[in-house]
Amino acid sequence: MSAASEQGVYDEVLRLLQLAVRRHTGEEAAEAVIASLLRLVRIAVLDPDGRDRGNILALLKTAVLHDPTDAERTWVELVSECQRLAENQSGGDLASLRSFLTSRGIRLLPDQHIAGDVRRLEQFTQETLSSLSHLAHLDVPTATGPGRIEIDRTVTDALVAHAPEKSFLLIGEPGSGKSGAVHSAAERLISQGHPVVVIAVDRHPVPTMDDLTRNLRLESASL
């Protein structure tokens, strides 16, 4: 970038900062205010098709993606989204970019800030499913000893089909097999690679989400 181009960018940044301050305060920003804002700015020069590409793909494979083979596709999606944001004079943070990639069907590793809570929820889900297993199977005698047969419920197929798409409430008479169906559906969704959390609410009689967070020994209230 030439010196003239850099000066043009700098002048535009100053104009936008002045505009933002004026919109929020109704007054012109003092030079000291603008200087303090500029000290918070960091510029990272990125060459998406050049020398930075290899390092970025390696980082995506090791620290971001559940499936490393998605690295090339993920990078193309990120570059495209950033171009769109720039054209709209907008921006995005970590949460919005993760949400964008997830909406494109790209599976991500847990955010490192909540990785411990994710592991705790996975462990808790497995413990809950184990406790519900007897409601999803029948133990029957066979020629070689006791055998276990999964109870085939039609509703299980519906749960598996709709759970990844939208929220819903499963209702039924006591003893009609709701817990068994949820168990079978959860096991199947997990085997398909979907993130699943199973909470038996009768074992956690808490009135608020904050109470549930503490009850499950989670660190992040956002979960």
Image: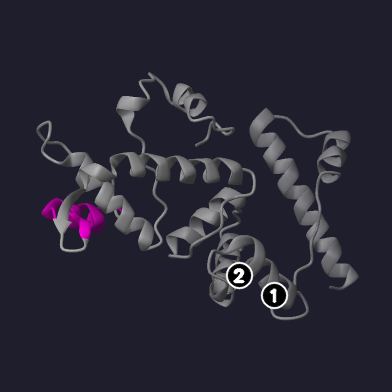
> Could you say which quadrant of the image residue 141 lies in?
bottom left
| Category of crowding for the residue at label 1, using alpha-carbon neighbours closer than 10 angstroms: few (below 14), some (14–19), many (at least 20) | few
Residue at the extreme top of the image, as rendered = 207
Q: Which residue is mark 2?
A: 79
Q: Which residues are magenta?
A: 145-164
Q: Is residue 4 left or right of residue 181?
A: right
When the figure is inspected, residue 16 is found, relative to residue 61, above or below; the finding is: above
Q: Which of the pair 196/37 is nearer the observer?
A: 196
Taking depth in this image into account, of 168 and 192 the one nearest to the observer is 192
Q: Report which residue position mark 1 lands on.
A: 48
Q: Please tell me which residue lies in front, 72 or 40.
A: 72
Q: CA distance from mark 2 to mark 1?
A: 8 Å
Quadrant for the N terminus, please: bottom right
Q: Are marks 2 and 1 in contact (CB under 8 Å)?
A: yes
Q: Quadrant of residue 50?
A: bottom right
What amino acid is at disc 1? Pro
